[in-house]
Amino acid sequence: LEHQFPLILNEMNDTTYRDRRIYVSLAAQQGDLSTVKDCVQAGWSMLSRRHNNTNSPIFSAIQLGRRDVFRAMLSGIQHRINFKIKKSESTLLHEACYYAHKGIV
């Protein structure tokens, strides 16, 4: 996905929320910081609509220990860092500790 955001953005204006979430998750998994930053700047969601569901781009970054990607994603949602995941009652910080990624914590 590296450097693909500007090329596909024109085609994605009518893209569904689900497709955008998948795209950002793939960029997070690959550690593609430039694409993640472009998505954040475009206002794309880094969290799931389902109250911090673990199936979201930011959780992909946490689970894989992508510290720089996580920080870029967090820049637009700092106010939600303590929101709890409905299923487990944990927060982004809890998840980072669970996956033992000290750099994220």
Image: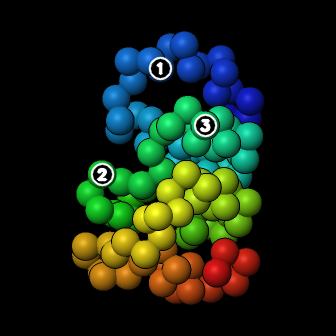
Q: Is residue 16 left or right of residue 86?
A: right
Q: Amino acid at mark 3?
A: Gln
Q: Residues within 10 Å of mark 1 (few under 14, many from 20)?
A: few
What residue is at 25 percent from the left and 73 percent from the top?
A: 86
Q: Is residue 19 above or below residue 95?
A: above
Mark carried by residue 12: 1
Q: Which residue is mark 2?
A: 49
Coloring scheme used: rainbow
- Quadrant location of the C terminus? bottom right
In which quadrant of the rendered view does residue 39 lie? top right
Q: Is residue 14 above or below residue 68?
A: above
Q: Which residue is mark 3?
A: 41
In which quadrant of the rendered view does residue 103 lie? bottom right
Q: Nearer the viewer, mark 3 or mark 2?
A: 3
Q: Is residue 78 left or right of residue 36?
A: left
What residue is at 67 percent from the left and 61 percent from the top?
A: 71
- Quadrant location of the N terminus? top right
Look at the numbered disc 3 and give the secondary structure of its residue.
helix
Q: Nearer the viewer, residue 27 or 49?
A: 49
Spatial CA span between label 3 and label 2: 19 Å
